[in-house]
Image (cartoon, rainbow, N blue to C red):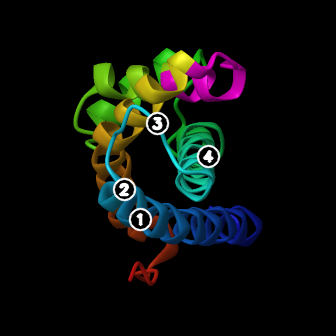
Amino acid sequence: MTEQMRNLLVNELNLLVNAKEVLVYSFNKCSAITIKEAYEPEELESFESFTGRFARLSDILLQKVFRLLDILDLDSQGTIRDRINRAEKKELIDSAEIFIEIRMIRNDIAHEYLPEEIRDIFEKVLLLTPHLLDSVERTLLYCTKYTSSNLETN
């Protein structure tokens, strides 16, 4: 691997770690709020931040880090589903089906405007966040073979 590719990977992993940290903060905050029929404006704002951070972390992982790992591992590019399936084979994720659901929820977050659907999105994001966070830890461990050091994951 070239030094340029190694630096790119380290930069992407640092971005991943930073996005993970803010998602953990929002996850803890929204877990305490819980799912409700109606939210106070501050609670709604917290959940909106939470879902945005969930979508951002899933994008960084799937679109940046997993794609770069496919290049480094000399895997063919293919579709997002192909990338998810390869991540499962590499044990970066626990389940391809869960990550397909994470991708679908990410799309719902980006395109959903109906208030009655927002509550379902909040609930799904609360349930799926631990899987996303676990995959970040697995990915950081996997990447040590390329970075030759552990990144801080707090």
Circle 4 packing at 10 Å, graded few (<14), some (14-19), many (20+), is some
Question: Gap between marks 2 and 1, in whole Å?
Answer: 7 Å
* Span colored in magenta: 105-115
Residue 81 in the image: above or below residue 27: above
Q: Does 28 sit left or right of 50 as displayed?
A: left
Residue 128 in the image: above or below residue 47: above
Q: Does 12 sit left or right of 29 as displayed?
A: right
Circle 1 packing at 10 Å, graded few (<14), some (14-19), many (20+), is some
Q: Does 7 sit left or right of 106 as displayed?
A: right
Circle 3 packing at 10 Å, graded few (<14), some (14-19), many (20+), is few
Query: Is there CB contact under 8 Å for labels 1 and 3?
Result: no
Question: Gap between marks 3 and 4, in whole Å?
Answer: 14 Å
Magenta span: helix, strand or loop, mainly?
Answer: helix
The mark that comes first in sequence, 1 or 3, is 1
Is label 1 in a helix, a strand or a loop? helix
Image disc number at residue 130: none
Residue 2 colored magenta? no
Q: Position of residue 103 (x, y in %)?
A: 51, 25
Q: Amino acid at mark 2?
A: Ile
Which callout, 2 or 1, points to the residue nearer the camera? Answer: 2
Occupied quadrant, residue 5: bottom right
Q: Amino acid at mark 1?
A: Lys
Q: Residue at x 64, y 16 (%)?
A: 114
Q: Position of residue 142 (x, y in %)?
A: 35, 59
Q: Amino acid at mark 3?
A: Ala
Query: Is there CB contact under 8 Å for labels 3 and 4?
Result: no
